[in-house]
Image (cartoon, rainbow, N blue to C red):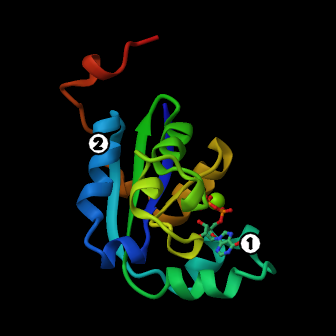
Amino acid sequence: MERTLVLIKPDAVQRGLIGQIISRFEQRGLKLVAMKFIQMDEALAARHYAVHQGKPFYPGLIAFITSGPVVAMVWEGKNAVATVRATMGVTRPWDATPGTIRGDFGLTMGRNLVHGSDSVENAAIEVALFFDDGEFVNWQRETERWIDDGE
Ligand code: IDP
Ligand code: MG
């Protein structure tokens, strides 16, 4: 079963959109297995956005992601990585399809509300960056057979 990291970024927290954003992933059928409300420090931000180091927007990105609290979550399900990315919408909110999080709530790239891992490989790395083994909740969802066809 795939797992992926989602961050509700500081802009979405400040705008009071935590509940609506979590609802999108819940409604999609993904299963929440870990969650915490944290303020990221520079070190964590630098590790999380290491691939963007050296790019012109990097300093602004680090300043933004550490500017206020974020909600960090791990969502589980078949094709969880791709499903989260599709639910979020593309990076540039002006290109994001209405009905996606960025397409419904976003206007600019530097305030695009959510982060989601972009590959299964990166998801494993990012999940481990934010969560220790003991922070996952192993629970049985009673609606599972109405969501996952078992194929
Ligand atoms: P993603 O969040 O959709 O995966 P990435 O390309 O991984 O997009 O970029 C990480 C984050 O950096 C974006 O979500 C966005 O907030 C910011 N970002 C990316 N490119 C730019 C840019 O050209 N200008 C400003 N911010 C950018
Ligand atoms: Mg990315």
Amino acid bearing label 1: His
Amino acid bearing label 2: Glu
29 or 108: nearer the viewer? 108
114 or 73: nearer the viewer? 114
Residue 53 horizontal/vertical position (percent): 76, 77
Say if residue 32 shows up in the picture.
Answer: no
Disc 1 is placed on an element classified as helix
| Residue 121 vertical placement versus 40 (above, below) | above
The answer to whether 138 appears left or right of 76 in the picture is left
In which image quadrant can residue 63 be found? bottom right
The extreme right residue here reads 54
How crowded pointer 2 is (Cα within 10 Å; few <14, some 14-19, many 20+) is rated as: few
Circle number at residue 27: none
Q: Is mark 1 within 8 Å of ligand 1?
A: yes
Residue 64 horizontal/vertical position (percent): 52, 84
How crowded pointer 1 is (Cα within 10 Å; few <14, some 14-19, many 20+) is rated as: some
Q: Total label count?
A: 2
Q: Earlier in the sequence, mark 2 or mark 1?
A: 2
Disc 2 is placed on an element classified as helix
Task: Name the residue rendered at 44%, 47% in the picture.
Answer: 98
Distance from Cα at disc 2 to Cα at disc 1: 30 Å
Residue 107 horizontal/vertical position (percent): 49, 68
Say if residue 91 shows up in the picture.
Answer: yes
Task: Name the residue rendered at 61%, 61% in the picture.
Answer: 92
Q: Which residue is mark 1?
A: 52
Q: Which residue is mark 2?
A: 26
| Residue 104 vertical placement versus 36 (above, below) | above
Residue 101 horizontal/vertical position (percent): 42, 54
Task: Name the residue rendered at 32%, 46% in the picture.
Answer: 24
